[in-house]
Each structure stands twice: as structure tokens, then as C-alpha cells.
Image (tube, helix red, strand yellow):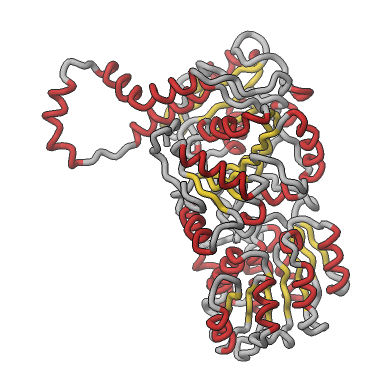
Amino acid sequence: MTKFETLGLEQPLLDAISDLGFESPSEVQEKSIPILLEQDTDLVALAQTGTGKTAAFGFPMIQKIHAESRTTQGLILSPTRELCLQITNELKLYSKYVKGLSTVAIYGGASITEQARQIKRGAQIVVATPGRMKDMIGRGMVDISKIDYCVLDEADEMLNMGFYEDIKDILSNTPKEKLTWLFSATMPKEVASIAKKFMHQPVEITVGTKNAGASTVQHEYYVVGGRDRYAALKRLADANPGIFSVVFCRTKRDTQRVAEKLIEDGYNAGALHGDLSQNQRDLVMNAFRKKQVQMLVATDVAARGIDVDDITHVINYQLPDEIETYTHRSGRTGRAGKSGISMVIVTRSEQRKIKTIEKIVKQEFVAKKIPSGIEICEIQLYHLANKIKETKINKEIDAYLPAINDVLEGIDRDELIKKMVSVEFTQFSNYYSKTKDLNTSDSSGERSQKGSSDGGNSGSVRYFINVGERDGYDWMSLKDFLRDTLNLEKEDIYNVDTKDSFSFFNSDAQLTDFILQTFTEFKVDGRFINVEVSKKPGGSGKGGRKRDRKRGHRKGGGNKSFKGGKKGGYGKKGGKKRQGFY
């Protein structure tokens, strides 16, 4: 595999890379860095969010800049304050061994005079949001008339946010002979017009397929009645214990409403939208990065600049007004070599939009059913049992054990286990036993899977397996493990759903005896791997076999590449209406 040493980077940068623990460049880095180092050229790079674009332009800029001069030589424009700060922090890490190099962030919501002072002290690289940069140029606080390099990062995002005129005004203050490097996830006509107007014969590189979504993301959709969106969201969360997700809504009002309902129901949720102050945004985002918030409900504009690698799910509570925006939403998961799932909740009248999105992201969706109450109870029961098993014993309870043993005297082991599990499970079971099936009568549509999921002699069978994410598996690598172990074709294993310590998968019913026999007394590294037919089979998502295409074998996302209540508040679990185990 290609190493950073072969890309032409100098020793100070290689030392910084070594400190950061990264070994191999990502595809966009491998393609961009040699071109930008060896050629004085404009560049258009199309690559998804989370593929390591900051290092792709950051290393060449740092290496080419003259650190001994205090003149501003590089300008990087990014759409949001969060992304601006993130790029700045990363460039400081990359340039830690380059003596005298200074990178300064310019963004709204902070002291403009302090930012001007930092630039005056000498900033060879300025990272800025368009609005604040235009303001500082107008006040004569920054001079970009001598820059050699200009980067437009997340160009499509900036244009979607209405920064076209600002970008045009900013670029008019830069020298014509500068080099412009444009990085974007998609190439709409507005981005193409920027390239045509401000760039000269740019080299174009594409990572993956132009405008396509990341191959590490599985796309699913669920058809429900219009009034059942929130109930469907709750079930999807409950069916995925340990979920760490961004939930997208179209409007600020819906974002706040959904977040408040989740908090009221006891979930770790937070809202992120344009009506929040900068301080409120910072509080919510910091809580999200620390995973104190597990479900971040956001508008598209507010979510721009979120850069968190461990997001397990993106949930489209509503589809965006601009279908192309879906690419950016789904790109929030499946980052840094890990896999992710993008879920879409749609009504029957919206189903046609799925085909349009498939053409844009160049990937097929799996049509799945909203989990039933019984399925969710089964998942949560396994999760709770494992949680008890993995809990570390607090030695401070030793002093209380004699009294506790007196209280529990006469209860045998099996009865004690049932009582322990029932403490939380009964409340959960009681809630879902009274709920209806949320799937619309025709939600199977044209993509329905052959057979049923009843575990009989025909159709599809759902299995339970006692390995999951904690064992280093995601849905891609577990599917590969099952296919390799069973020596089956790629279509024979589908609808793989990994949880923290266990998982589910489907196969056709005629394979049941073979699968169960294979996993009898089956060990991996001395540990028994158990497979059994799920007691309450489900999840036989429609379209499973044909549409569950093989992905690359990845175990644990170990790719070491640069990847780079109250209004506005967030709530913690444990509310009086809480319905889930976390």
C-alpha cells in the first residue's frame, strides 16, 4: 500500500504524520498531494465528506508556504464556524515541526478585533468563513492581495448556504496568478460556474463516482403513515441500542419539536438549528462529541461542518427539499473507513423520491419494515442481559451484601435472573404491547423479498448470532465473515444488523439446517460463536438479496488514514416516560 513517504512530503510533515499515528494516505490524498506538490496548477477535487480532504490540501500548502515570511500566503474558505475551527486545528497539528508557521481562524461569533490582532502578528495561513472574511476585508483588517494559494473547501455547501456573492467579492481581492484548489462532495452547476469563472484549466480528480455516496454507507428506507413519523423514529432508535446519530429535519421548528419529544421520552437528544445562539450551538456540539447526546436533531444548514467520525446512523426524519442534499446527510456516517447506515422515513407519496436519490448517489436502497414491538423487545432483552454481564462490580456494595442476601433469601438463580431483567423489561414490554404496526399496508412495494420471515420451510429466516460491534464487526465485515465461514454466494446472506454485543442476519429457509449445523460447537479464537433462529424473526427488509451488494472486508474500521428540553438544550436519558434501555 502507498505510504506518505512516496508522495513527496518533506521530513517535518512526515514527522507530524508519524506522531498522529497514520500510516497510509486515503484515496483523495494519494491523488491530490503529488499533483499539488509537483505542479503549479488549479485543482478541482470531488470527494465525499470524511475522506481526508483537509490533509489533501493542507500538506501541500504547508510545504509550499515560506514560513520565514509573515505575509499571508494561503487562504482557506469553509462554510461554517465548526469546520473552520476543525481545519485550523488540523493544520496546526500537521505543521507542528515547521518553525514559524502560524494558522489563524476567522469566523463569526468571536471577537473580530482579537482575530485581527492574531493576523497582524503574522499568519501565513488564514482559515475563514466567507461572511467574517468579507467583513474584515471591508474594514481593512486583513490583506489577501498577495496570497499564493486559495482553497474553497466544501464548495457546494458554501454555495447552498448563499455565499456565492461573498466568495466572488473575496476572490476579487486576491491576485489573478494565485492557485485555486476547489474541494467539493458534489458538482452542481453553481460549483462548476465558480470553477469556470475563477480557475484556469484546473486538473480534475474524482474519488469514487462523481456525486455518488460513500460505499461504506448502507441506505435503507421505511414507509409509514404521515402521522407515524415520530413513532417510527422512536422504534428505529430502540431497535439500535447504543445508537449515535444525526436526525435530519427540514425546518427549525420541526427540529426543535422532535428534539424536545425525544428528551421528554428519555433519550439523550439535542437540537441544532439556526435560532440557537453560538453559545447554545457550542454546548450541544460539545455534548454530542462527548457522546452525552446520542441523537442530534438538526437542520441541514446547522449540521454543516459537523465532523464526528463515529456516527453510526443518519436518520432522515424528512427528506430534504433539494434531493442532492441527501448526499451530504448520508456522508455524516460511514467515515474514516468505518461503516454506517442512512435511514429514510417516507410516506407512500414520497416513495418515488427514493429512485431519484438512488440515481444521484449511485447506490440502491434496501426497503425495510419498521421493527415490531416484539422484535424491539427481543433486541433490548439481549442488550440488557449483556449490559448486566459486562457491568463492573462496585466493591463498595460488599458491606451491604449480608442485608441484600437476607432480602433475596429463598429465590433461586433462574428466578433471580428473571426478576432482575424484568425490573426494566416489564415497563418496556408493556409500552410496546399496546402499540400498533407502523408499516403501511403496501410498504413492501415492488421490492418485497421472496417468502416470509416465519422461519418455516420457505421464504426468509432471521438468525441471532452472539457477536457484534464490540467484537470488531460492522454490517460489512460480519456479512463477509458469515459468507466466508459458510462458503456461500454473496446473495445468500443479507439484512445484517449489528448491535453492540450481538447481531441478526437473514438467509433463505433452505439454508437453515446447514447454517445451524455449521455453527454447532463452532469456535473463533477459543470462543464459541452461537447462531440460532431468532425467536421473533423480523427485519427481513424488502429487497434484501438483490440489493445487498458485497462490500470490501473491513473489520472494526481500522483504516489509519487522515480523515481528516429547553430550547437549544439537550436532555439525558432517564426521564419518567423513558421507553428504552441505554
Q: Quadrant of residue 451?
A: top right
For residue 404, above or below residue 173: above
For residue 210, above or below residue 143: above
Q: Residue placed at 71% from the left, 23% from the top?
A: 443
On the question of residue 70 being in view, the answer is yes
x%, y% of residue 16? Answer: 53, 71
Location of the C terminus by quadrant is top left
Q: Quadrant of residue 550?
A: top right
For residue 112, above or below residue 471: below
Question: Relative to 460, is 323 on the left or the right?
Answer: right
For residue 542, above or below residue 266: above
On the question of residue 7 being in view, the answer is no
Location of the N terminus by quadrant is bottom right
Front residue (pair 505, 34): 505
x%, y% of residue 428? Answer: 43, 25
Front residue (pair 113, 256): 256
Q: Residue furthest bottom?
A: 69
Q: Quadrant of residue 41?
A: bottom right
x%, y% of residue 136? Answer: 65, 81
Question: Relative to 86, is 452 on the left or the right?
Answer: right
Front residue (pair 554, 421): 421
Q: Residue furthest top?
A: 457
Q: Residue placed at 28% from the left, 16% from the top?
A: 415
Q: Residue placed at 59% from the left, 15% from the top?
A: 512
Q: How many marks?
A: 0
Question: Relative to 325, is 112 on the left or the right?
Answer: left
